[in-house]
Image (cartoon, helix red, strand yellow):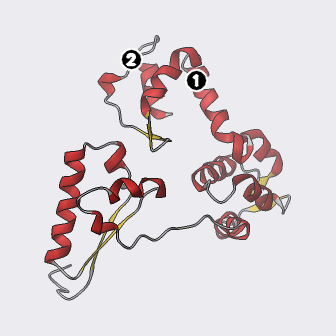
Amino acid sequence: MVQARPSAPVLVIVDQAEELITLSGEAERDDLLGLLARALDADPRLWIIMIMRSEFLTGFLGTEQARLFRDPVAVGTLSRAALVEVIEQPARRAGLTFDPPTLPQRMAADAGGDALPLLAYALQELWLAAGPGGMLTGDADQRIGGVTGVLTRQADKVAAELGGTDEVLPTLLKFVTIGENEPTRRRVLRSAVTEPSGGSSRRSSLRGC
């Protein structure tokens, strides 16, 4: 494609760039940033967008390639009205309806502007619990735990299936690291995960949770 349009701009997107700090070593991070910097210097057509959680920006500003981050754009949280639109528009396109009609407003109020992943998960569970004719109901929202409780409810269910939190919690904590005073995910080799009693079936359940 680049050869067919030699004058066309090229956009490279690096999503979840904070993992260069939370999951990668310093040498690996610097190698990648150096590669990107050299590519920018070599080709004026190239644009690079790095997407990260804002609290990790200072970690990149302290590297040798701090110039890569000279034009940061902060994406603010969505307004209540925008959240309602996020809920209503996809449902409308899919032929789904809400009962009561004010359910999207209630879910938006529960979510807040900085909880989009949680809202997305709640909407998925609500869709799976949809009634006849694609009706998304307030009763179903309560059954799944609502926006603020749906993930806790699912986590408790998985923990119970695996034998209880006393056995599962130490393993789950291995998948979390604290960086910049914020918890972030951490990749763990399967061989480093202690197998709970119950054998491979329980390990498979843990990988899928």
Asked if residue 205 is positioned above or below residue 123 in the image, the reply reads: above
Residue at (18% x, 54% y) in the render: 31
The disc labelled 2 sits on which kind of residue?
Answer: Thr
Residue 6, picture quadrant: bottom left
Q: Residues within 10 Å of mark 2 (few under 14, many from 20)?
A: few
* Residue pointed to by mark 2: 194
| Mark 1 → mark 2, Cα distance in angstroms | 15 Å
Considering only vertical position in the picture, is 26 above or below 58?
Answer: above
Q: Residue at x 22, y 82 (%)?
A: 45
What residue lies at 42% left-to-right and 70% top-to-bottom?
A: 72
Left or right: where 39 falls relative to 91: left
| 207 to the left or right of 85 | left
Local packing at callout 1 (Cα closer than 10 Å; few below 14, some 14-19, many 20+) is: many
Mark earlier in primary sequence (1, 2): 1
Q: Where is residue 86, by image quadrant?
A: bottom right
The amino acid type, in three-letter code, at marker 1 is: Ala
Q: Which mark is residue 41?
A: none
Outermost residue, front side: 62
Please give left or right for residue 202 compared with residue 116 in the image: left
Q: Is residue 134 visible?
A: no
Q: Quadrant of residue 161?
A: top right
Q: Quick one: 3 or 70, which is closer to the camera?
A: 70
Percent position of residue 136, x then y: 76, 55
* Residue 159 circle label: 1
Q: Position of residue 13 (x, y in %)?
A: 33, 66
